[in-house]
């Protein structure tokens, strides 16, 4: 069956945006809705893959054939991806991971201090999940990363493909309101390690996901 191009392959997909707590009622996050990652998980499952979707703070409906694991923070995402990767044929890292988290999480709501017009929050670096996976990746496994950029899209994406040892990077311009975060449409530039690129047209995230799955099916 032509449509079952990923039959028997185990794929991990990450989606959504991590939340990094400040205190019991506040957190730092980003604009990722998880729509692109969910569309990829669905396209992979439709192509016959066994899909595990690790979702950070999404409110999208789940669907048959995909097992969903919910996480909140970057460190929880890192733990779930790391413990599953050895068993997988590939990882598609579409989640927006916070690069930094508050150094400490207050155990009670932080109060305003009378007469203080500023407050300082110290942030520490989160683990770079895809970068550490890139270091343990076997020749029979693939890793696809995403690059959401507001400027210098191609230059930044090219740097990431090397520094993170990716097999493919999906670059999108999140500065463009018609595509990207929370939109149902997307337009991406696929970049291969050999410098080859392919830009999709503006189309639904499902369509972009299907194109991506076809390309991934040709990896090995
Ligand atoms: O460096 P940047 O965050 O733009 O790289 C984007 C890619 O790296 C995405 O695939 C994202 O999921 C992944 N990433 C990660 N761990 C981080 C930050 C980003 O895996 N801490």
Image (cartoon, rainbow, N blue to C red):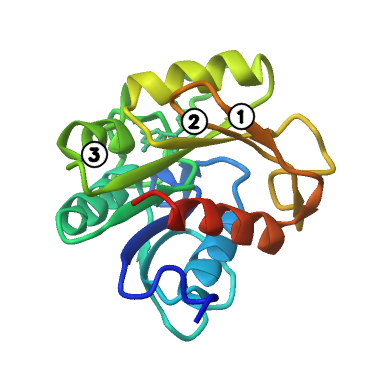
Q: Is the CB–ligand 1 distance for label 3 below 8 Å?
A: yes
Give the class, few, some or many, for how many residues have Cα within 10 Å of label 2's Cα (few <14, many ≥20).
Answer: some
Q: In this view, does 172 lie to the left or right of 88?
A: right
Q: Is mark 2 on a helix, strand or loop?
A: loop
Vertical arrangement, residue 52 with respect to residue 213, above or below: below
Instruction: State whether residue 121 appears in this view.
Output: no
Residue 172 sits in which quadrant?
Answer: top right
Residue 197 sits in which quadrant?
Answer: top right
User: Which residue lies at the image location 55% right of the left edge and 64% below the top edge?
Assistant: 38
Vertical arrangement, residue 8 with respect to residue 208, above or below: below
In percent of width and height, residue 204 lies at 76, 59
The circle on residue 192 is 2
Give whichever of 31, 184 is nearer the camera: 184
Residue under label 3: 133
User: Which residue lies at the image location 62% right of the left edge and 55% below the top edge?
Assistant: 211
Instruction: State whether residue 211 appears in this view.
Output: yes
Whichever of labels 1 and 3 marks the residue nearer the N terminus, that label is 3
Q: In this view, does 35 lie to the left or right of 80?
A: right
Residue under label 1: 197
């Amino acid at each position: 069956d032509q449509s079952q191009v990923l039959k028997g392959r185990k794929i991990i997909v990450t989606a959504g945006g991590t939340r990094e707590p400040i205190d019991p009622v506040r957190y730092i996050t980003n604009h990722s809705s998880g729509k692109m990652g969910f569309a990829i998980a669905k396209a992979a499952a439709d192509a016959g893959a066994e899909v595990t979707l690790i979702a950070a703070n999404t409110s999208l409906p789940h669907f048959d054939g995909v097992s969903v694991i919910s996480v909140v923070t970057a460190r929880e995402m890192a733990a779930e991806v790391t413990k599953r990767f050895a068993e997988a044929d590939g990882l598609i890292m579409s989640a927006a991971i916070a690069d930094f988290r508050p150094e400490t999480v207050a155990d009670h709501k932080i109060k305003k201090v009378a007469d203080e017009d500023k407050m300082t929050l110290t942030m520490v670096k989160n683990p770079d999940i895809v970068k550490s996976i890139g270091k343990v990746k076997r020749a029979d496994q693939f890793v696809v990363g995403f690059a959401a950029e507001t400027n210098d899209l191609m230059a930044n994406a090219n740097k990431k493909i090397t520094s993170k040892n990716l097999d493919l990077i999906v670059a999108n311009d999140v500065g463009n309101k018609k595509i990207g975060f929370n939109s149902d449409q997307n337009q991406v530039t696929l970049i291969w390690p050999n410098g080859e690129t392919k830009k999709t047209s503006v189309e639904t995230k499902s369509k972009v996901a299907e194109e991506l799955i076809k390309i991934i099916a040709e990896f090995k």
